[in-house]
Amino acid sequence: MLSRVADALYWMARYSERTQTNAHILQVQLLNMLEQSGKENEYIDHWEAVLDICASKEEYLTFYESIRVNLLIEYLLFSDKNCNALHATLRAVRENARVTRDSIPIELWELQNAFYLSLQQEIIGRERPIPLIVLNSFLQNVRKTSLTVTGLIEGSMDRDLPYYFMHVGKWLERAEKTIRMALIILEQHKEVAISLFEVDGTFLLDLSEATESYLRKHRQTNLLCVIQYLLQDKHFPRSVMFCLQKLEESLSCLENDPISARYIELHTPLKNLLFAMMNVDLWNITLEETILLMEERLCQCIDFGNTFATIYHLYEPSVQP
Amino acid sequence: MMKFYESGMFFDEMFDGNQPKPHYRSFHHKLNAFPKEQLDEKYQQAQSSFLRQGITFTVYGAQGGTERTMPFDFIPIIIPHEQWEVIEAGMKQRVKALNCFLHDVYHEQSIFEDGLIPKRLIENNPYYYKEMLGVKVPIDNHIFLAGIDLIRDENGIYYVLEDNLRNPSGISYVFQNRYVMKEVYPEFFSKHSIQSLDKQMAFMKKALLAHRPACMKPGVEPKAVLLTAGMYNSAYYDHVFLAQQLNIQLVEGHDLVVQDNKVYRKTIYGLEQIDIIYRRIDDDFLDPVVFRKDSLLGVPHIMDAYKAGNIAILNAVGNGVADDKAMYAYVPDMIRYYLNEEPILRNVKTYHLDDDKQRAWVLEHMRELVIKNVSASGGYDMLIGPHASDEEITKFKEKIIENPFQYIAQPTINLSRAPAFQDGKFYPCHVDLRVYVMKGDDIYVLPGGLSRVALKEGSLVVNSSQGGGAKDTWILKEELQYAKSSSRCTVLDGKI
């Protein structure tokens, strides 16, 4: 497989995953805010968290002076200034699908293409502000399309190189996102005097689509319990542990030979990450230590992504060995 | 009952006066039975099918490119079997002669020595590459895929309008038009027996793989790729379609690298040598070391690998010398010279404006003629005398006087017409036909081709970049010439 095509498949999967998660997060927040008043601290906190999880607050503030709902919606969903706006990630998915059309099911390309075109037609040109009910149904459509995409991939793609490159993109993106969500929520508590043991984790559960799964197994929604769950649960498909296991599976399928140099080079850091994740114990460390630990894990994920890209020549080198 | 029109002074593919021709009767009958609302609905369905599949081309304008679908018209061009046989033979003959000519241009140059074609025509030609002199291309074939444009005059006589020997595009539309036609208008196929397109790609693949470089070991299957300019290229869909159908990888220039005069593709496991490149980028962009320095689409040093015989490039480099509008006039002579045969298909009379006598006559008769830039295509830099303003005529006269080598003139031909159904009504539109010819060890002609239609009422330009659309083309099978329900009439439709 061409490096360029592998790269495009990997990024298509990452952007697709990003789109799906961000759409969910935005949907949660748009409903959530209906019950809050604009003056409450929680309201601002939640929007700031969403902004930092789906994009970057720092970057947002270089364009706008204040955090206001309509501006945020524009920025997170449609603005050209934000490379992680839903419109931009959907475009990236479509363009990557377009250049890999000969490696993915035709229906997959058609689905991504038709969805992007309908977005262009129905939403982009619409008068602002877009009514909440329209936004909500749009976000719902994004999620439904993502689910169809997942179904198509799982149900119709050969278990071959293209499939596994997409797999790695998807699970790595998801692992990073989950760590990031936990990290951002933790950082928001740095300036608050309340002890972490008393903080509620419902919002994080909602953002990470974990409420249903978590509440079946636990009664307390304490933030630390929630984070521990999101990092370590082996059965919840958004937990970091689950994602890492999926990555490990993909690697063994990409490289059939467990003693090949490529496999060892990739598997070693992954194994280290898995081990580190297994041994996380949030109950006996301070908030600062917890944040540091999360940052380290996030860096490990990013490093793994870089190693993966280097080994398979995903970043176009000028001369290959 | 549908409301049509009378064929009038033009040759019409479907009608004689207001009556359908024998080979269109069955189709016409079916059409008459259709409620108009259903046709409107089917029209929408067909267009959205193209859009959903991303079968679009890019139109370049002030604000970058916009994506458009090629408008599709469901009324097919139907060609009787006997007529197609003649076209097919004519096409094979033409491509064979053109290939001999290209070989001659880059080797012995005997046709110039013998005085049949003035040598200045190649010397002045920007597509004549001295780098290609003496280069031996695999199986001595320069033309892997040709797109030859045919038109018909008011008497129904076919003329070759243009040879495209560089990168003829649009073959994917032939297949997609048929696909959409079968999907959306299945009713119209009943009672017709037409040549299928299903197996045609196998011929193309065979022709492609026939171009194995001479240095390859026997028994090893050559590795082929399709080199595209990328997804923003106007013909990208064509490239994707062909790569898929030929089962070869779609690569961009930066996916390839030349080392030790060999061409490699960059894969996830490192470099892998390739043997055949079906390139869909122009010569100019192929190798920034030899041609345009600013080209980002090509592969540095690929010409070295080509000359060393380690890679086949299809179509061959330097084909532009044979398909420009000035050389076109000499194709009948090439057929006589190389094949010792009389041309089967006619050429449109062409005036060379660097000839003083011809130029003087043309300048007097601009209103009756079409003036074309020899190296332009897509309907650009062209003057249609009868439709031009005084100002345009003066401007073209100046251009001709300033640069007579650059232009040719041809008589205006009353292009034939065929009915189109757009915006809820039928009206006659001018049509032409691009026929695709593939050459490997043998020559194949794709049955039918791309019927292009000038959908703007009264317009003569069929190019998709200028508002043209496309139709399906049906070649009737021998045994069921005029469909079961029609008469036994065997009169040919028009003449060859």
Image (cartoon, coloured by chain):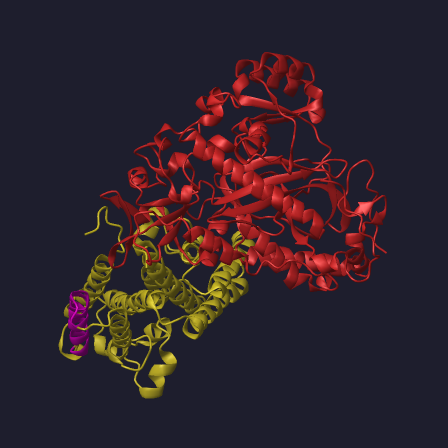
Residue B474 appears in the picture as rendered: yes
> Between B100 and A191, which is closer to the camera in this rendering?
B100
- Does residue A156 lie above or below B47 as drawn? below
Q: Position of residue B99 (x, y in %)?
A: 48, 38
Q: Residue at x 22, y 78 (%)?
A: A197
Q: Residue at x 29, y 41 (%)?
A: B305
Q: Position of residue A273 (x, y in %)?
A: 18, 71
Question: Does residue A93 appear to the left or right of B46 in the view shown?
Answer: left
Q: Quadrant of the N terminus of chain A?
A: bottom left
Q: Residue at x 13, y 75 (%)?
A: A285
> Between B360 and B322, which is closer to the camera in this rendering?
B322
Q: Give the colour in which the image draws chain A.
A: yellow
Q: Position of residue A84 (x, y in %)?
A: 37, 56
Q: Which residues are magenta?
A: A259-279
Q: Position of residue A246 (x, y in %)?
A: 29, 74
Q: Give the colour in which the image draws chain B.
A: red
- Does residue A315 lie above or below A172 as drawn? above
> Between B374 and B43, which is closer to the camera in this rendering?
B374
| Residue A274 shown in magenta | yes
| Residue B367 shown in magenta | no
